[in-house]
Image (cartoon, grey):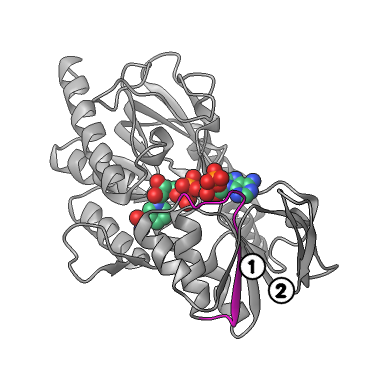
Amino acid sequence: MAINLCELVLSSASSIQLILPLTFLFRMEKNTAEKVQVLIIGSGPAGYSAAIYASRANMNPVLYQGIQPGGQLTITTEVENYPGFPDGIQGPELMIHFEKQAQRMGADLRYGLATKVDFSSTPYKVWIDDEKLIEADAVIIATGASAKWLGIESEQRLNGYGVSACAVCDGFFFRGKEVAIVGAGDTAAEEALYLSKLCSTVHMFIRRDEMRASKIMQDRVMNTANIKMYWNTETDEILGEKSVEGVRVKNNQTNELNTIPVKGFFVAIGHTPNSEIFKDWLHMDEAGYVKTIPGTSKTNVEGVFASGDVQDKIYRQAVTAAGTGCMAALDAERYLSEKGLH
Ligand code: NDP
């Protein structure tokens, strides 16, 4: 983009002979590796906590924020369980605090997505946006997890046209309308409650005869008058040509089909760890969660550490992610000291 803009400006000034050297300079920048001590990949509670600790230990961390700066908390509403905020705090606001704190400590925060890594030898290589190469003595992975989808054709076709995986982002478009939500965990419960404040009715589909969500969230959902629960119910098809007009659901005990007219369809069935680019290098479980040595953030590659939801399928809380981000920075510091690199 920068090259095109530059070419355009220079062309209009009729300084054609300057185009080549400048283009060459931009290419040079793309192809030349930048060497850093600690590279942090990801900007949720884990990544920013690692950045705060690594900065305070003078490791001059560079942090790439990824596709969703601030991570999953930027698409949530009230966070009631992050210690230190007795009245609760909005997720996006909490992440702004994290970011500002990391910045104040001196972390170098940058836009960009890590697209490829090579952990075969040190310094480790990480490519950003398929272009820029960073070489790092230590790498902290904090790439989090992404929303899961049901995998039916209509869900993909109508994604963005009434189908969404984020009630907080898109609920607003369905004010006063009927919507559906699938899922039975804390996320689904939280999103159903959020939608119930905006929408006339929230139809909630639960595939078993019980919810996985915590008791307090279950109670809140069940005590909300405009949330209608459907037990043992699976989504058969989302209906509509250009936008969502309804949903056909099936009772998996009786096989009975039922069509419900809704304008919005929200999917809240959990997350997948963002670990794809590391699969050739790091040990993972069958779901793709990066394995760490218990009680540490160490992966099977010396000097590569993992923190937050990408390595945690059990707790998955902002506070546990922040805690493991701190661990990763401390582990990285010890590693670099032992190697005489810090
Ligand atoms: P979970 O994995 O906890 O729940 C996913 C839910 O989706 C389950 O109920 C599951 O059903 C259901 N599901 C999965 N696949 C399908 C499918 N194909 N069709 C229908 N239903 C399906 O994910 P969450 O995102 O809800 O929560 C993740 C973690 O984050 C949890 O530990 C949770 O406690 C935590 N969290 C905490 C919050 C808070 O404290 N404020 C807020 C949000 C999340 P089944 O039960 O049958 O497997």
Check residue 110 for magenta coloring.
no
Q: Which residue appears at 29% of the width and 57% of the height?
A: 99
| Residue 39 percent coordinates (x, y) | 34, 35
Q: Which residue appears at 25% of the width and 46% of the height?
A: 49
Q: Which residue appears at 44% of the width and 64% of the height?
A: 190
- Judged by its main secondary structure, the magenta piece is loop
Residue 63 figure quarter: top left
What label does residue 262 carry, if any? 2
| Residue 198 percent coordinates (x, y) | 53, 81
User: Within 8 Å of ligand 1, the CB of disc 1?
Assistant: no
| Residue 45 percent coordinates (x, y) | 31, 49
The residue lying toward the viewer, choosing from 262 and 114, is 262
Whether residue 257 is situated above or below residue 66 in the rendered picture? below
Q: How many marks?
A: 2
Q: Indicate left or right for 59 with 19 as reference.
A: left
The residue range painted magenta reads: 198-212
| Quarter containing the N terminus | bottom right
Whether residue 273 is situated above or below residue 70 in the rendered picture? above
| Secondary structure beneath label 1 | strand
Nearest to N terminus: mark 1 or mark 2: 1
Cα–Cα span, label 1 and label 2: 7 Å
* Residue 66 seen from this side: no
Q: Are marks 1 and 2 in contact (CB under 8 Å)?
A: yes
| Quarter containing the C terminus | top left
Query: Which residue lies under the disc numbered 1?
Result: 180
Task: Name the amino acid type tagged 1.
Answer: Ala
Q: Indicate left or right for 209 with 322 as reference.
A: right
The residue lying toward the viewer, choosing from 204 and 69, is 204
Mark 1 crowd level (few <14, some 14–19, many ≥20, 10 Å Cα): many
Task: Name the amino acid type tagged 2.
Answer: Val
Q: Which residue appears at 23% of the width and 41% of the height?
A: 323
